[in-house]
Amino acid sequence: MGVAGATHETQPRIRAVLRHLGLSLLLANIVPSVLFYVCLVSLDVWAALVAALAWCYGAMAWRMATRRRMSTLLVLTLVGLSVRTAVAFASGSTFLYFLQPVLNNTVVALLFLFSLATARPVVARLAADFFPMTDDIAKRPRVERLFWHLTLLWAVVALGKATVTLWLLQSQSVVNFVVFKDTFFLAVTVLAMTVTVSASVWVARKEGLLRRSDARQPSTRRARARVLGARP
């Protein structure tokens, strides 16, 4: 009885998983991109670099101060922006700042692809950011296949981002580059996230890893009440 209750308590609801996922993306990707664009248009590109980086350090400090679990996405964004900003200021060239994502996405894609040959693809390592993952859950056949396919998906997404970024960088002005790149990245990311979440929810339901929605509970209670009331 105690084990069953404990297992039930560790099963999150879909809304909780999606809320956690949305918060991670908001802090690590959406807010820095919006800050960068606003400062780029209203001030200049150097202010935009500092604003995006300052946000990431502030978000990291807030998580540490409130003793929240470190987000892998936020750490990766922070490291990437730190390196890009340092190179840009050291060289005095913003072109290198915008070129680095091409190299970064290419490296990320290669890491994702190479990890497919290992026991733990990259997505398996990131899964704990969004779901209370245990070794038992991670080793289930359906879950392992899910991690493998999602790792391949995000490798293709990274390669696509690198290709489009390089093309835009060579053909557009700085402002147009930022607008078009962010719009494309957002569309591709939303599509990939939709596929990721849909596939993950399907597998989680098949494996019994998600709790039923609270919305179903009142109707269940009413149905039970009617049955009990009908008894003699």
Image (cartoon, helix red, strand yellow):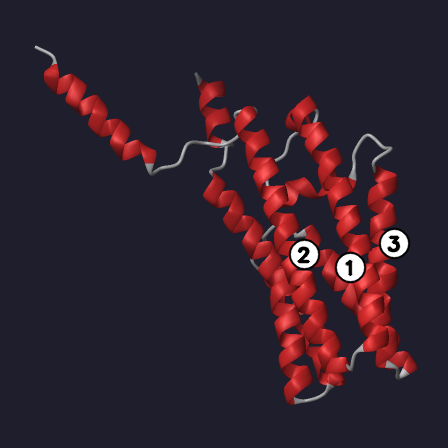
From the top left corner, tell me how far across and down residue 167 is, in percent.
Answer: 84, 68
Q: Mark 2 points at which residue?
A: 188
Tell us which disc is closer to us: 2 or 3: 2
Give the alpha-carbon distance from disc 1 to disc 3, as whole Å.
Answer: 12 Å
| Residues tagged 2 and 3 counted as in contact (Cβ below 8 A) | no
| Gap between marks 2 and 3 measured at Cα | 18 Å
What residue is shown with label 1? 161
Q: Reading the chain from its start, which is encountered first: label 2 or label 3?
A: 3
- Judge whether 120 appears above or below 52 on screen: above
Q: Distance between the residues labelled 1 and 2?
A: 9 Å
Mark 1 closeness class: few <14, some 14–19, many ≥20 residues within 10 Å: many
* Residue situated furthest bottom in the rendering: 43
Which quarter of the rendering shows the N terminus?
top left
Q: Is residue 1 visible?
A: yes
Say what amino acid the circle numbered 3 marks. Answer: Val
Rate crowding at label 3 as few (under 14), some (14 to 19) or many (20 or more) other CA atoms within 10 Å.
Answer: some
The quadrant holding residue 84 is bottom right
Q: On the picture, is 103 further left or further right than 150?
A: right
Q: Mark 3 points at which residue?
A: 107
Identity, as a three-letter code, of the amino acid under mark 2: Val
Q: Position of residue 124 (x, y in %)?
A: 72, 37
Q: Quadrant of residue 121?
A: top right
Identify the secondary structure beneath mark 3. helix
Please report the residue visible at 51 percent of the width from the left and 32 percent of the height from the top.
10
Q: Which amino acid does label 1 sit on?
A: Lys
- Say which element carries label 2: helix
- Label 1: element kind: helix
